[in-house]
Image: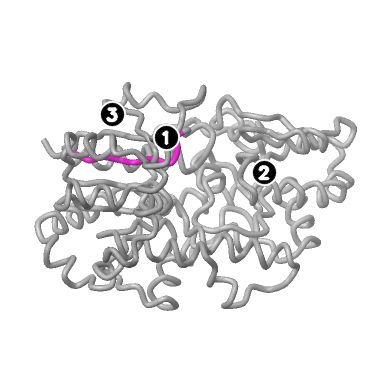
Amino acid sequence: MKHLVIIGSVWPEPKSTAAGSRMLQIIALFQRQDYAVTFLSAASKGEFSADLDSLSVTTKNIELNAASFDAEIKQLNPDIVLFDRFMMEEQYGWRVLENCPNALRILDTEDLHFLRKAREVAFKQNRSLVFEDYISDVFKRELASIYRCDLTLLISKFEMELAVETFKIDASLLYYLPFLHENKPLEIPNFQERKHFVSIGNFLHEPNWQTVLQLKKLWKSIKKQLPQAELHIYGAYVTEKAKQLHNEKEGFLIKGRAESVAVVYSKAKVLLAPIPYGAGLKGKLFEAMQFGLPSITTKIGAEAMHDDLPWNGYISENDTDFIEKAVALYSDNYSWETAQENGFTILEKVYKKELFEADFAAKIEDLVENIKTHRNHNFLGQILQHQSLQSTKYMSKWIEAKNRF
């Protein structure tokens, strides 16, 4: 049986983060290709970590900066190794290459970290992004990781275009794989059965926290026009500074972790997501479509999420526009139902699993069979594997030697 090893920065938490849900989708894709899957991580499992054992995934803890990993990966002898974020490739990629040189190496970016970082810098300096913002240390590390791998998964068409057109990365090294939608029988409550606004996002993710601050600024104007409405803000790992924003009188309610996104989204009438910056695809907006929940977001929020199809609600240009559209969508049955149908159409035409599964399987099979030819064409990747450019390898070895004493 073919064998996939995933090296995770954390144990997946699908009920806490969109990244956790995506990882389970990737695992399922490979399992349907008859791969046995082993998940390795140096992180500690938490209360909300997915039960991977119940999904027929073998799990093992590994160490950082330790030769014990070399023996571990050699014994596992995988056909494919997938790194969850570029930091894992930096830490373990060279060890995989030395011990399993024939294994296909795949990087899952989750989103392009350097893009999110560039936008964060511009946002916090209250200015437009300029090209120089991209060229950070994160950019250099992430691109080096992309070149060292045989294939990199990108979740966003915008990121694909940025990588190929702006930074001239060979398209053969990249693969577009968004969130995947499976048709599931869902009972979708109608307009009259729903009430209140909702927002959701892991509070440890800085763009989510900035979104909450945006909501705090906008909410009073919305509440003034809809005095019976409340805004319920959910998210894992709620911080003390977030709890201080809770205000019963204003109807601005910090709810903390959602036990069930399905229940929360099925009860709410409109999702508010004034996302000021970020990268990749927004899991909250994807899930909102699945549960028939219209949304109002920004251009960054909706980026690469709907192709040229009408949005699942409204895309706002400024604060005044956001407030007006929030009130309108919440109040008008026809606009709300149209938005909901738009969301269902986006799911079918942009994210349907069947649009990607067979092509992805064929891509992986072709790479496994032609790995030598593929690597010979990726000459920059070979250059980056040269010992003179492997600072992370020798830093790891130094830490390993230091830890012996």
Local crowd size for mark 3, using a 10 Å CA cut-off: few (<14), some (14–19), many (≥20): some
Q: What is the number of the mark on residue 318?
A: none
Mark 3 or mark 1, whichever is nearer to me:
1
Q: Which residue appears at 18% of the width and 66% of the height? A: 375
N-terminal of the two: label 1 or label 2?
2
Q: Are marks 3 and 1 in contact (CB under 8 Å)?
A: no
Q: Secondary structure at mark 3?
A: strand
Query: Would you say 303 lies left or right of 168 here?
Result: right
Q: Are marks 3 and 2 in contact (CB under 8 Å)?
A: no
Q: Position of residue 18 (x, y in %)?
A: 49, 42
Which one is nearer the viewer's eye here, 100 or 149? Answer: 100
Compared to residue 162, the image places residue 372 above or below, namely above
Look at mark 1 in the image and give the residue it sits on: 405
- Dividing the image into 4 quarters, which one contains the C terminus? top left
Q: Position of residue 374 (x, y in %)?
A: 17, 66
Q: Which residue appears at 47% of the width and 43% of the height? A: 19
Look at mark 2 in the image and give the residue it sits on: 270
Q: Which residue appears at 35% of the width and 27% of the height? A: 52
* Res. 376 image quadrant: bottom left
Local crowd size for mark 2, using a 10 Å CA cut-off: few (<14), some (14–19), many (≥20): many
Mark 3 or mark 2, whichever is nearer to me:
3
* Res. 33 image quadrant: top left
Q: What is the number of the mark on residue 57?
A: 3
Query: Would you say 235 lies left or right of 66 here?
Result: right
N-terminal of the two: label 3 or label 1?
3
Start-end of magenta stretch: 3-12
Magenta stretch contains residue 9: yes
